[in-house]
Amino acid sequence: MRAYFADAPDDISLNDIDVDKIPSHVSFIMDGNGRWAQQRGLDRTLGHKAGVDSLRECVTTSVRLGVDVLSAYAFSTENWRRPQHEVNMLMHLFATTLMKELPLFHQEKVRLKFLGDLDALPTETRDVFEFGLSQTKDYDRMTFALAVNYGSRAEIARAARLIAEDVAAGKLRPEDVDVDAVSNRLYTAGLPDPDLLVRTSGELRLSNYLLWQLAYTEFYVTDLFWPDFDRWEYLRAIHAFQGRGRRFGGVENK
Ligand code: IPE
Ligand code: IPE
Ligand code: MG
């Protein structure tokens, strides 16, 4: 781990981090690929390609730090509004990248998970996703949850529909519908809520991401575009997180 974090910049290093207080679940809104490319006079799609390198570094860094769950927002239910060629390129990129990166998941014993409605994805993408799921299902060093065709409102509406179906079938009583009944029917069922949410490119909004799960999550927003996000910015985010007093509505428990 020391070698991985050697050559630190002046302002942050592994020494600034309490390795016994690493957040259990870190989540990323990977934003700014398009602007990163435009700044360089490149096509937006090249920003997405560059973003893959940041995500790979993020997976490796998470494993090194001992994060239990890493989640990342890759494609929202609203992103279908983008130009067709960009959508097609992203769907193809998801499939090819996953195939290429599977050895990393095997090497690091990372279990893959997807958040979102995969039925609406092109067959190529869905098939590769299902292959990745089956190949990594027994790993337990870290869970990597990728949100694809994910929208929090659709997710909550789906949970409500599943509850209604169970009630109609007599499997659930209305008086037993509680917070856990909803949580257990979200795509994130079984995962802890994020402790830390990082959004790149400076935007101060959730863009329909994990509205339910982020109820008590600490936020860290960086102006860096996603392709510029690296292990050092990750450490800065964790350092900021470790300086926060989380109260969960109660009194601070230091
Ligand atoms: C985030 O980068 C990646 C996806 C939404 C797929 P953007 O493509 O949103 O980049 P900007 O925000 O336009 O710069
Ligand atoms: C959020 O980014 C979705 C992902 C990062 C996948 P967007 O770029 O789609 O969000 P808005 O449109 O700026 O809110
Ligand atoms: Mg964006």
Image (cartoon, grey):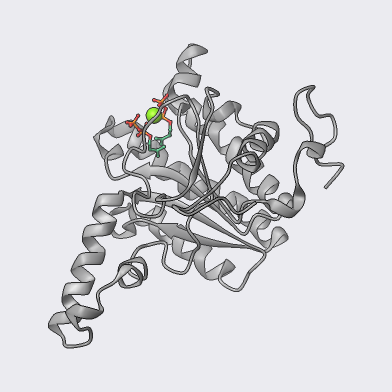
Instruction: Name the residue furthest bottom.
Output: 170
- Residue 51, x across and y down, in percent: 54, 33
Q: Residue at x 48, y 47 (%)?
A: 217
Numbered label tally = 0
Q: Residue at x 66, y 41 (%)?
A: 57
Q: Residue at x 17, y 78 (%)?
A: 174
**Residue 224 lies in what quarter of the image?**
top right
Query: Which residue occupies the foreground of this view, 250 or 108?
Result: 250
Q: Is residue 188 above or below residue 152?
A: below
Which quarter of the rendered image does ligand 3 occupy?
top left
Q: Residue at x 33, y 37 (%)?
A: 207
Q: Is residue 218 above or below residue 9?
A: below
- Residue 185, x across and y down, in percent: 32, 69
- Residue 105, x across and y down, in percent: 64, 58
**Residue 69 lies in what quarter of the image?**
bottom right
Q: Is residue 27 above or below residue 41?
A: below
- Residue 48, x across and y down, in percent: 48, 32
Query: Which residue occupies the foreground of this view, 22 or 77?
Result: 22
Q: Is residue 83 left or right of residue 110?
A: left
Query: Which residue occupies the foreground of this view, 156 or 18?
Result: 18
Q: Is residue 107 left or right of residue 161?
A: right
Instruction: Name the residue furthest front.
Output: 251
